[in-house]
Image (cartoon, rainbow, N blue to C red):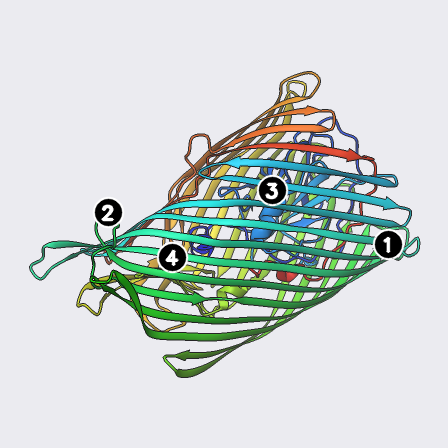
Amino acid sequence: MKTQILIAAIFFSGFTFAQEKKQDTVKTKSIEAVTLTKQVFKKQSDRFVYDVASSPVAKGNTTFDLLKQTPLLSTTDDKTFKIVGKNNVLIYINGRKSNMDSESLTQFLKNTPAENIQKIEVITIPGSEYQVESSDGIINIVLKKKMSDGTSGNMRMSNTQNKYNASNASFSVNYRKDKLGINANLSGGENINPQSYVLRNGIGQVRNESVGNIDDPNKNLGGYLNIDYQLTEKSNLALSWNSWANKSYNSTIDLLNTLTMPDDKGILETSYTKTKNKEDARNYNNSVNLNYEVKLDSLGSKFNANAAYLIYKRFQYSDNNTMISDVQGSTSGFSRTGKKIIQNIPQIVNNFSGTVDYIQKFKNDFTFSAGGNFNKTKTDNDTKNYNYAYDYDKNTGILKGIKSQTDFNHFIYDENIYGLYITFEKKFSDKFSGKLGARYEITNSLGTADSRKDDVPSNQEIKQNYQNLLPYLSFSYAINDKNNISYAFSSRMGRPSFWELNPVRNIITEDNYTQNNPFVKASSNYNQELTYMYKNSYFLILNHTYEKDQITQVPLQKKYVDNNGMERVRLAYIRTNFGDKQEMSAMLGIQKSLFKQYLTMNFNAGIQHNINKGTLNTDPTTGEVFDTYINNRKSTSLVINSNNTLRLDKNKTWFLGVNFFYVDKQQIELGVLKNLMSLDLSIKKNWNDWTFAVNVNDVLRTNIVEIEDYQSNGNYNYIKNDMYRRNITVSLTYNFGNKKVKKVRDIESASDAIKNRTR
């Protein structure tokens, strides 16, 4: 959890999934369950549908594992997903989004068995009925519909070994009796996330290098409870509760820093410092949603209303130390040992949300939808920094801290979002259908910062109000039974996450930090996509995204002279709006079963072209001026993703999985991201209600992040981050009870639109 601020915010700013908001409201047409003997991938209306109900791939796997094998989806960090041609995705379950922050959701997916999944829907460009951000796509996980009263469930246990050992367990149960349905899950785990770093940057002959490790222990516990009651034949009332807790104590950064610079005669000299940071953090995420739904006629018309409350709390305490050392990193024997910075960085998010949706279907294959939403959010961030200078007494061997500076900042952010949407959907013939819609959003926000630096108070108020009309258009044309073509366009806003707005500085080393920014404004995004499908197995997708005022992290450098007269280089990663960006991609793919279903192949390959255009030289929060950073660069890269399942016996009990991805080097905001690849292998045995599985990830140990940037003024920056993604996981899953228990009704949550913007 520790340097998630650094790692998550910096190193994957170009290709992470921001778990965000959605609001499915209007219809997600249910596709009738069909008994299949093989996996099916098809284009339906505004989404791709991957039917895994009868697939052995799901059995014994986690939901996360199943998503990794879904067409159009990929992951390079084993934490987040992206849809081909998109950076971010939102995860929905039964048409609604879990109210967990992105870290908690990742752990939840990795602890949830995949046996109960009917299908996975990939919505590359969501319609106006969805409240999404930027160019986000949606992954909707639809659970199986079971047909009788009774109780069923499953238990799963797993153990993973990379640099350290990790264990996870989960228990899920479904209960159905007459008009009452209850669905519950409890899962948890314990792990240590290891990382190693090489950080290099410099201006001319003045250079910094930091090499070392980060160890982040985590304990997770969470789950959900859904209660659904049928009031009448046409109406239902439901209550949903989600909870997740994480504890990350004694998370450490241990880096050896090397400073190289010329002396008065131009001869290069080298000095060393040791950075040892310790962090204790914990967070809690709780949400409750009340849903009422009434069916209006036999055609599928309905009215849906939700009211939700979400509270997110994060408490983070860090003790950051930089000490003079020798080349081996030993700090003993130095008279002036360095600096200590203690940071207390809490965050509390309260959100109340409400949604209403009205869907009217007509006999002539025409559907009218309208609705609205309201989100009221308040975040409270009371940050305290204490700066100390070290003094070491050689005679007593005592290290003393002398208080030198305090820096307090209490930032409160209030935001109100009002949204209205309307959509018209028409099936003109068996071959042609279209959908037209628009959202109108009003955003009013006010941020107040009460600061005190060395007992000198200051106050700041940041107010942002804006209104946006966001159109949507799509159509689909079936040329014949085997050929289909579709097009979609949408316009969206991309609001910053709440933690990005909190004007806090997160210390990495003495000369390296990240800076958040309360002045970040929403970005504008325009997305379009053209899709061709052949036999529901072969596809071509052309995608274009244009983002204006993109929100990202920008590396700024400058020379400065410290208190000892030494010339040094400061590197700050500034969160801000940074110019415009375009992404274009062309992807060919296939999803097919071969050799009498002994081999199931999911393969796609294509080209991605990025155009970056941005310039920055000033920290908007502090006003500090740095050397100008320019990213007016283009790149074209190859992307390959292949997931294959081989059945090893006639009885369908043994399965071998071979998965591979390759991402060519590409230009992102921080510089050139070098190529990434990973080969993953798995073997699985099904025996009655038991499933045994062994997974080996990153067999060749090639999934290591490297980013490099050279500026025309001589500034350079290099990052190498190894997250020890080579690992082996052994798992055991047991299914029990009546396998035909009917699931709880699909329910949408009003607070879906806010969840991603928490950490």
Res. 72 image quadrant:
top right
For the image, the number of numbered tags is 4
Give the residue furthest to the front.
396
Mark pair 4, 1: CA separation: 51 Å
Q: Name which quarter of the figure residue 159 lies in.
A: top right
Question: What number is the disc on residue 110?
Answer: 3
Q: Residue at x 49, y 42 (%)?
A: 76
Q: Residues within 10 Å of mark 1 (few under 14, many from 20)?
A: some
Of marks 4 and 2, which one's residue comes earlier in the chain? 4
N-term-proximal mark, 4 vs 1: 1
C-alpha gap between disc 2 and disc 3: 39 Å
Q: Is residue 36 left or right of residue 601?
A: right
Q: Could you say whether the residue bearing mark 1 is in a helix, strand or loop? A: strand
**In the image as oriented, which residue stretches furthest toward the top?**
650
Residue underneath mark 2: 328
**Label 2 or label 3, whichever comes before in sequence order:** 3
- In space, the residues marked 3 and 1 are separated at their CA atoms by 29 Å
Number of other residues with Cα within 10 Å of mark 4, as a class: few under 14, some 14 to 19, many 20 or more:
many
State how far apart marks 1 and 2 are (Cα).
66 Å
Query: Amino acid under label 2?
Result: Gln
- Sequence-wise, the earlier of marks 3 and 1 is 3
User: Foreground mark, 2 or 3?
Assistant: 2
Residue type, label 1: Tyr
Pointers 2 and 3 in contact (C-beta within 8 Å): no
Residue 139 image offset from top left, x and y in percent: 64, 47
Cα–Cα span, label 4 and label 3: 29 Å
Depth check: give the residue in front, 276 or 207.
276
Residue in front for this viewpoint, 239 or 57: 239
In this figure, which residue is indicated by the disc labeled 4? 277
Q: Are marks 4 and 3 in contact (CB under 8 Å)?
A: no
